[in-house]
Image (tube, rainbow, N blue to C red):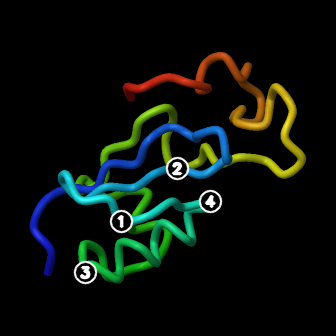
């Protein structure tokens, strides 16, 4: 089992969220499912997407587990449904 915490950055220009385990870059995830697969590979989590979303071992920046890019781009492509994009886009901090 990996020791440490995962850091999930805000969505970047490509629409993905860069993922780190402490200071080690693990990859870029484009969905909660992809994030779960990355974290399983390093044995940080052993469960499903809900376990990752609720884990205290995951630090979210620029929005939580529900913030993933929508297909098609545009100025609101990183918005949480029902919230303005400016609340999540380009922020670093929970």
Is tag 4's residue or tag 2's residue first in the polypeptide sequence? 2
Q: Are marks 2 and 3 in contact (CB under 8 Å)?
A: no
Residue at which label 4 appears:
30
Label 2 residue SS: strand
Instruction: Name which residue lies at 50% across and 37% down.
Output: 10
- Which label belongs to residue 26? 1
Drawn side of residue 61 relative to residue 20, left or right: right
Residue 21 is situated, as x and y percent measured from the top left of the image, at: 24, 59
Instruction: Name which residue lies at 27% across and 78% down.
Output: 42
Residue 65 is situated, as x and y percent measured from the top left of the image, at: 51, 50
Residue at which label 3 appears:
43
Is tag 3's residue or tag 1's residue first in the polypeptide sequence? 1
Residue at the farthest left position: 3
The quadrant of the rendering that contains the N terminus is: bottom left
- Crowding at label 3, few (<14), some or many (≥20) Cα neighbours within 10 Å? few
Residue at which label 2 appears:
17
Q: Are marks 4 and 2 in contact (CB under 8 Å)?
A: yes
- Which label belongs to residue 47? none
Report which quarter residue 92 is drawn in: top left
Q: Gap between marks 3 and 1, in whole Å?
A: 12 Å
Is tag 4's residue or tag 3's residue first in the polypeptide sequence? 4
Q: Gap between marks 4 and 2, in whole Å?
A: 6 Å
Q: Gap between marks 1 and 2, in whole Å?
A: 11 Å
């Amino acid at each position: 089992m990996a020791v440490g915490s995962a850091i999930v950055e805000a969505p970047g220009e490509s629409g993905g969220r860069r993922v780190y385990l402490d200071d080690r870059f693990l990859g870029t995830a484009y969905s909660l499912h992809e994030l779960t697969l990355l974290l399983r590979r390093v044995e940080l989590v052993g469960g499903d997407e809900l376990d990752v979303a609720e884990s205290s071992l995951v630090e979210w920046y620029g929005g939580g587990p529900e913030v993933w890019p929508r297909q098609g781009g545009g100025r609101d492509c990183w918005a949480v449904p029902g919230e303005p994009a400016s609340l999540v886009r380009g922020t670093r901090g929970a």
